[in-house]
Amino acid sequence: METQKLLYTGKAKSLYTTEHPDQLLCVFRNDTSAFDGRKIEQLERKGMVNNYFNAFIMQKLAENGVPNHFVKIAKDDASIVKRLDMIPVECVVRNYAAGSLCRRLGIEAGLELTPPTFEFFLKNDELHDPMVNDSLILTFKWATQQDIDQMKKYAFAVNEVLKKLFLDAGLLLVDYKLEFGRHESGLLLGDEFSPDGCRIWDAKTKKVLDKDRFRKEMGDVVEGYEEVAQRLGIKLPQVA
Ligand code: TMP
Ligand code: ASP
């Protein structure tokens, strides 16, 4: 992995080429961003925690029929992933009302959503990730009908696997954001699954354990992520 070239820098991750043309090194940085990149801070250990968190979740999903880009952990803060041609939309599934759903529709926070909801957002910080729908996605050719059908199917399959995994650890998976990409083997879940891109509450106390701690200046952001990791049985390297 010597001849690495920086291919892409996102708000919290960087992608490097590897000697394998089909594989990239995904580095999870400590940068933590909110409000479309208007609030950015470095949070110590976050890159490492998210790397191990993502690896654990992606492996669980692969075992349960949700194909994804994860290959293996390469370093404490980086993993090897398959190179994907990303679809520029974000898929959000919600089990409980929070965040923009409450703001847009005046729904009371914490309301259980039955059945769970599904929304598409266009990945565009300058436009503040506007909500889009199947019709817009097809017209502007961001994805095909087959991609749309598969993204919805996988997004709900993720819910079946993770809702139970989290509940068994006394945690509520409130909502989450997924991104997909095309690979020669078909559509794969890409990007990451970590507390940066989902909401997780303690099932009894409703304590917030995700990036809302950062958005709302609640403190102990990475400590929240680590509490979730520990409760899910994710082994994190001990830092001296
Ligand atoms: P929202 O309530 O702001 O629409 O977000 C729903 C969930 O999706 C929440 O867990 C945060 C996550 N999300 C991201 O991680 N990045 C994004 O750009 C968006 C729109 C949502
Ligand atoms: N990930 C987006 C950002 O950094 C949205 C968010 O998580 O609030 O701005």
Image (spheres, rainbow, N blue to C red):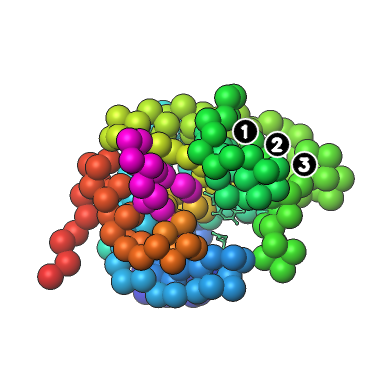
Camera-nearest label, 3 or 2: 3
Disc 1/disc 3 C-alpha distance (Å):
13 Å
Would residue 15 be visible to someone looking at this image? no
Q: Position of residue 139 (x, y in %)?
A: 87, 45
Question: Which amino acid type corresponds to the residue marked 3 in the rendered image?
Answer: Asn
Residue under pointer 3: 133
User: Percent position (x, y) of residue 233?
Assistant: 23, 42
Q: Are discs 1 and 2 less than 8 Å apart at CB?
A: no
* First-in-chain label (3 vs 2): 3
Q: Quadrant of residue 49?
A: bottom left
Q: Quadrant of the N terminus?
A: bottom left
Label 1: which residue?
A: 117
Residue under circle 2?
A: 148
Determine the residue positioned at 28% across, 63% down. Answer: 76
Q: Earlier in the sequence, mark 1 or mark 3?
A: 1
Task: Name the dominant secondary structure of the magenta segment.
Answer: loop
Say left or right for 12 vs 206: right
* 205 in magenta: yes
Q: Nearer the viewer, mark 1 or mark 3?
A: 1
The kind of secondary structure element at disc 2 is helix
Residue 173 can be seen, yes or no: yes
Q: What segment carries the magenta color?
A: 198-211
Check the image and name the residue furthest to the right.
139
Residue drawn where x is 17% and y is 67% of the image: 239
Extreme-top residue of the structure: 115
Question: Which residue lies at the image location 25% right of the left edge and 42% below the top edge?
Answer: 231
Label 1 sits on a secondary structure element that is strand
Q: What's the amino acid at mark 1?
A: Thr
